[in-house]
Amino acid sequence: MPVDIFYRNKFEISELESIAIDLCKGKTLDIGAGVGSHALILQNMGIDVTALEISKVACDIMQKRGVKKVVNQDVFQFEGEHFDSILMMMNGIGLCGDMAGLEHFLGYLKGLIVPNGQIIFDSSDIAYLYKADDFISSNYYGEISYQYEYQSVKGNWFKWIYVDFNSLEKMANKLGWACEMIFEDDMDQYLVRMRLA
C-alpha cells in the first residue's frame, strides 16, 4: 500500500469515504485514525472529533498535522466518553481480527455510543479472491493475516478481518444493532451505518 494513501485530503478520498464523513454528526470518535486524514477533514468541517490511534508514531504525526484531540490508546482500553458518531475507515473494523473478535467489539462499542448514536464503517466481501474449493477451512474466509513492510523493514504479522454484509448484519442483529448498508462500490466494498435497535 503506498504511503501517500494515508495523507489524503478531502479532494483525494474515495466516494465511499466522502459519504461516510458526511454522515458524521455531533461528537465523533475516529477509531484507528492513522495519521489523521479523516479526523482533519472532520475537524475542518467543524465536527468535534477525537482521533484514537494505538501507534505513538502516528499520533505524533497527527499532532504535527494539526489534529486537536489525539488519544494514543488501544480502543479496548478507551472508556469514559460517549459519542454521537463512531467512524472507522479503511476497513477499520478489521482490527477485530476474526469473527469472535468482531462479536466482542460490537458489544464493546455499546459502551461508547450515546442513545441514537451511530457507528459508520466500511468493509469488503473478499469471497471473489477464492475458488469454490478454497472454502474448506473451518475459519471464516475473511479472516486473514497481514504484515506491513516499508523500506525493507518488516512489521509483525497481525490478524485482520474483512466481513461480508450478510454475516455482519446477522451478528449485529443478534447483538441488538440495526445494520444498514449505505453504499456499495463495484469492488465489493461497502459502507455501513449501525444504530442500537
Image: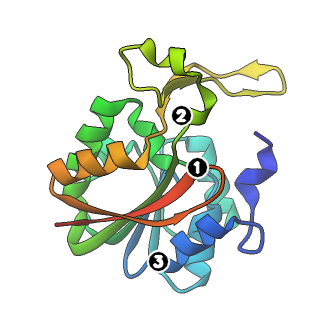
Amino acid type, residue under disc 3 in the picture: Leu
| Residue where numbered disc 1 is placed | 188
Amino acid type, residue under disc 2 in the picture: Ala
Question: Element under label 2?
Answer: helix
The span from disc 1 to disc 3 (Cα, nearest Å) is 21 Å
| Residue where numbered disc 2 is placed | 127
Specify which label sits upstream in the sequence, 1 or 2: 2
Q: Is residue 123 left or right of residue 26?
A: right
* Residue ID at (51%, 42%): 125
* Residue ID at (16%, 66%): 197
The span from disc 3 to disc 2 (Cα, nearest Å) is 28 Å
Mark 2 Cα shell of 10 Å, populated few (<14), some (14-19), many (≥20): some
Q: Is residue 30 visible in this depiction of the protein?
A: no
Task: Tell me, yes or no, whether the two marked residues, 1 and 2, touch with CB atoms within 8 Å.
Answer: yes
| Residue 179 spot, x, y in % from top left | 30, 61
Q: Which of marks 1 and 3 is in front?
A: 1
Which of the labelled discs sits on residue 23, or is there none?
A: 3
The span from disc 1 to disc 2 (Cα, nearest Å) is 9 Å
Task: Tell me, yes or no, whether the two marked residues, 3 and 2, touch with CB atoms within 8 Å.
Answer: no
Q: In this view, does 110 lie to the left or right of 19?
A: left
| Residue 42 spot, x, y in % from top left | 56, 76
Amino acid type, residue under disc 1 in the picture: Asp
The N terminus sits in image quarter: top right
Residue ranking furthest to the front: 132
Which of the labelled discs sits on residue 177, or is there none?
A: none
Q: Which of 164 and 40 is in front in this view?
A: 164
